[in-house]
Amino acid sequence: MVRVILHLDLDAFYCAVEKKDHPELEGVPFVVGGASFARGVVASASYGARLYGVRSAMPMSQAKRLCPELVTLPTRHRLYGEWSQKVMAILQDTTPLVEPLSIDEAFLDVTGIKGTPREIAERLQRRIANELDLPCSLGVATNKLVAKIANNMGKGRKRDGTPPRAIEVVVAGEEAKYLAPLPIRELWGVGPKTAERMYALNIETIGDIAYQSETFMMHHFGKHGYDMWRRAQGIDTRPVEPDQDAKSISNETTFEYDVRDRERLRKTIRNLAENVGRRLRKQQLSGRTVFVKLRWDDFTTLSRQTTLPHATQDDAVIVREATKIFDTNWERQPVRLLGVGVTNFEDAATQLPLWESEQDKKKRKLQSTLDALKERFGSDAIQRGSNVRRDD
C-alpha cells in the first residue's frame, strides 16, 4: 500500500489566535512578538504585514520601518499552547500516527484512511476551520520530505494578505518530477554555504542535483552529498514517529539591551533554571547534562555543558551548575541572549531515593506547592526575595 503522509502547518498561528480576542485586527497589518522596538523580535506576522516584507525573526525596529502603521501585540505562550492542544486532539482523532514538530506543525500518516489523499486533507482542514476557526495549510505526498516541501510551495503561491489555506498534493511516483524545477535551497540539508558551492558547480535546481551521479555528489560533498542526491530523487523512508520524546528542555531570553551586570545575569540564570526545573517535574523527567547558551553583542554564540553523576530535576542543582558554567565562560562581555537547559534524560520516577529524609520530603512538598502556584498564576507569581529590586 502506498503511504499517504500529510504535513500540516497552522497559518500564522499566533496571529490567528490573537484575532479571536481582537477581531478589529481583521485586515490590519500586525505582529506578535517582543514589545520593545530596541531589541524585540517578531514571533509571528499577519499576512497583511507580510505584504510589507515583515517576517518572523525580524527585529521589531526593522518591521516598524517597513510598515509604520504596524500594530504589535505581546506573545501569550500559554494561550497558544492551549489552542495547539486542541488542534493536536483533532489530529489524534484523525489518526494515531501524529508526529508534532512544533506548536503549530505536525506530520500525519493517514495511509488506509477512507478517501483520496486530497479528500483526507480537505476534511481535516475543514474540521479545524469549523471547530476551532483556525486556518491551516497541508502538503500531501508519499513521504515526509516531499509533503513538507509541497506545503511550503502551496503556501507561497498565495500572496494577497490573507491566510493561504493551501492544499498541495504530490501524486505518488511523481516526487522527483515535482521537486526538479525547485531551487536547491528548498531541499532540506542545503544551507547557504552548501548552496554557494553548488552554484559554483552550475547546480541551481533540485533537478540538477538529481541529474548528477552519486559518485559526483560524494566526491564534492562527501556522505552529505549522497544524502542530498537521494532527497533530490524524492526518496525519504522515515516513518511518522508519534512517540518521539523531547531531546532537551530549555528556556532562554533576549535582553532588551545588552547586559554586562554580573548580578543581573546570575539572577536571570536562576529564573531560567527554575523554569526548566518546573517543566522537568511536570513531565516527570530528570537530566544528567546541564547546558548554558550565551550570545554576545556581536552575535557570537556559544553553548557549554556539564554532565552530572546523577540525573536531577532540582532547581538548586540546575542553578548551581548553570552558574558555574556562566562564571567560567563569561569575561565581562555584553550579553545579548542567555539560555539554560537540561538534556540526557532519565525517567524521574526511577530517581526517587529509597530512603527519603524528612527534610527531603518537606523540600519536595514545598517545591510541588510552588510549581502548582506558578502553573496556575504564572511563573512570576512567586519570586525569591533576592530577585526583587528594592524599588519594586
Image (spheres, helix red, strand yellow):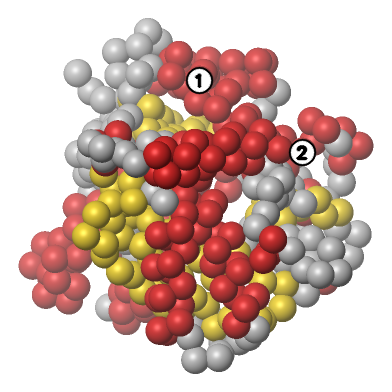
User: Residue at horizontal 26%, vertical 62%?
Assistant: 308
Q: Quadrant of residue 320?
A: bottom left
- Left or right of 365 on screen, residue 14: right
Question: Residue at the spot x=54%, y=67% of the render?
Answer: 269
Q: Which residue is mark 1?
A: 89
Q: Which mark is residue 265?
A: none
Q: Is residue 175 visible?
A: no
Q: Quadrant of the C terminus?
A: bottom right
Residue 21 in percent (x, y) is at 83, 33
Identify whether 115 is placed above or below 144.
above
Q: Are marks 1 and 2 in contact (CB under 8 Å)?
A: no
The answer for how far apart the CA atoms under marks 1 and 2 are is 20 Å
Q: Residue at x 30, y 34 (%)?
A: 349
Q: Secondary structure at mark 1?
A: helix
Q: Residue extending furthest left?
A: 215
| Image: 286 above or below 318 | above
Residue 33 sits above or below residue 223 on the image: above
- Residue situated furthest top in the rendering: 114
Query: Secondary structure beneath disc 2?
Result: helix
- Amino acid type, label 1: Ala
The quadrant in which residue 51 appears is bottom right
| Vertical position of residue 113 compared to residue 366: above or below | above
User: Where is the N terminus found, in terms of image quarters?
Assistant: top left
Residue 344 picture location, percent across and down: 27, 53
Dot 1 or dot 2, earlier in sequence = 2
- Percent across and percent down for residue 48 are 78, 49
Q: Which residue is mark 2?
A: 18
- The amino acid type, in three-letter code, at marker 2 is Glu
Residue at x 15%, y 61% (from the top left corner): 226
Q: Nearer the viewer, residue 120 or 359?
A: 359
Between 183 and 226, which is closer to the camera in this rendering? 226
Q: Residue 190: percent from the left, percent from the top?
A: 34, 65
